[in-house]
Amino acid sequence: MTRARGADRRASIVRAAFEVIAERGYRGTSLAAVADRVGLTQQGLMHYFPTKEDLLTAVLETRDEWDLLHFGHAESSMTVNQLADLVDYNATRPGIVQTYTVLSADSVTEDHPARGYFHDRYERVRAGMTQMLERHRDELPPGTTPEQLAPIAIAVLDGLQLQWLLDRSEVDMSAGFRTFLTLLGIKPD
Amino acid sequence: MTRARGADRRASIVRAAFEVIAERGYRGTSLAAVADRVGLTQQGLMHYFPTKEDLLTAVLETRDEWDLLHFGHAESSMTVNQLADLVDYNATRPGIVQTYTVLSADSVTEDHPARGYFHDRYERVRAGMTQMLERHRDELPPGTTPEQLAPIAIAVLDGLQLQWLLDRSEVDMSAGFRTFLTLLGIKPD
DNA sequence: GTCTATAATAAGATAGAC
DNA sequence: GTCTATCTTATTATAGAC
């Protein structure tokens, strides 16, 4: 039972870290603040994650597991309409969106521990998006290719998230992405 | 002469702050690091900017002045092709792009001093972009409106910047934006 | 206008008791 | 497994000399 307990603890610490990073960014996150949220001292937390970077790594790994759980092996197996549904879902979870918006931009700063993670992640996501658009090749505007459009589609998702986080009453992520799909000649279900 | 000197100093401090924020984010930026870059002590710097927040405010105001200088009153007076040229220019200045990518995402975190600034700025930029697209109303895909497309166009710009910062060899901001314009039915010059 | 000195606080990390 | 105690370093900010 000790092992299960430990796993639970770790999971709840990661969840708390996820929240605090959304609120304060990685550099603004203190281990004490995360520990506090799960009723531990800073030193108690460090029993599970010896360094702050270890905790960040765990947060990023957890997201990958969550992705896999929901979408199978990478974004490539999703359909465009499933992706639009994911945007709808995200629109109900500002915390999740905020963690990744904040963290991904954070990651371009000097010697940031998540830089490699996001570099690789975007490479994978572009590849997945390319495959996804491949299935709509015939519908795409003449002269455009899935390779060309993939980074743009991802940019729309990320960029709308930022605007939405800054003003949820003015910006509609879901509608925006669906409008973008029509620009691609893809009709939503 | 004392006044001119003072103004120069202030300007060089702001420039240094701009750089350090790009490298480390706002929360990761220390006044000492900025001071060091202009050959002052932390306390010497605080003669010009009494608090860290005052310095951030100056950085943001300077960007607004720069914008005005280059594009007249807001983005509305620019043409779509001038905007595409601006993207070309940005592609030669990763530092500038990085400061705003990092800072804008940073600003969505709790009690961030730049939150109001970016909220208002995006509102203005969306309005400007709407006006800009208005001039191409006839070319836009049937059923789409400038109001609807403006946040998407801005999202493309911001989203491409992030991907470009993470991997400049794989992502082409300029080409990406021009491809997006063709999706809108707008032909580049 | 810029410095030295210093206060006050907070951070990540280590050692060791229980 | 979690705590207290503590070290070390870094931070913003103030006071006052020159």
Image (cartoon, coloured by chain):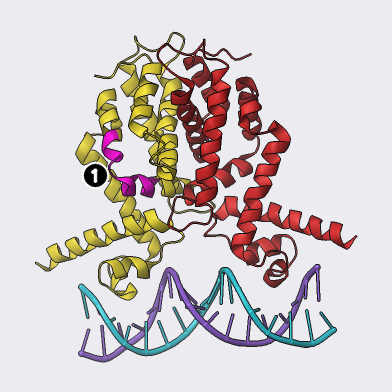
Chain colours: A red, B yellow, C cyan, D purple
| Residue B5 percent coordinates (x, y) | 14, 65
According to the image, label 1 marks what residue?
B66
Q: Is residue A17 above or below residue A137?
A: below
Q: Main secondary structure of the magenta part?
A: helix
Answer with the quarter of the image where residue B65 lies. top left
Q: Is residue B83 above or below residue A28?
A: above
Question: Does residue B107 appear anywhere in the picture?
Answer: no
Residue drawn at x 63%, y 22% is A79
Q: Is residue B87 above or below residue A50?
A: above
Q: On the rendered structure, is A23 left or right of B178?
A: right
Residue drawn at x 71%, y 70% is A41
Magenta region, residue range:
B88-100
Q: How many marks?
A: 1
Residue drawn at x 48%, y 16% is A184
Q: Is residue B4 above or below residue B22?
A: below
Identify the element where label 1 is drawn.
Answer: helix
* Chain on which label 1 sits: B
Q: What quarter of the picture does the C terminus of chain B occupy? A: top left
- Circle 1: residue type: Trp
Residue A78 magenta: no
Q: Within 10 Å of the Cα at label 1, are there few (<14), some (14-19), or many (20+) other Cα atoms?
A: few
Viewer-proximal residue, A93 or C9?
A: A93
Viewer-proximal residue, B67 or A140?
A: A140
Q: On the rendered structure, is B186 left or right of A125?
A: left
Q: What quarter of the picture does the N terminus of chain B occupy? A: bottom left
Question: Does residue A37 appear anywhere in the picture?
Answer: yes
| Residue A183 percent coordinates (x, y) | 47, 16
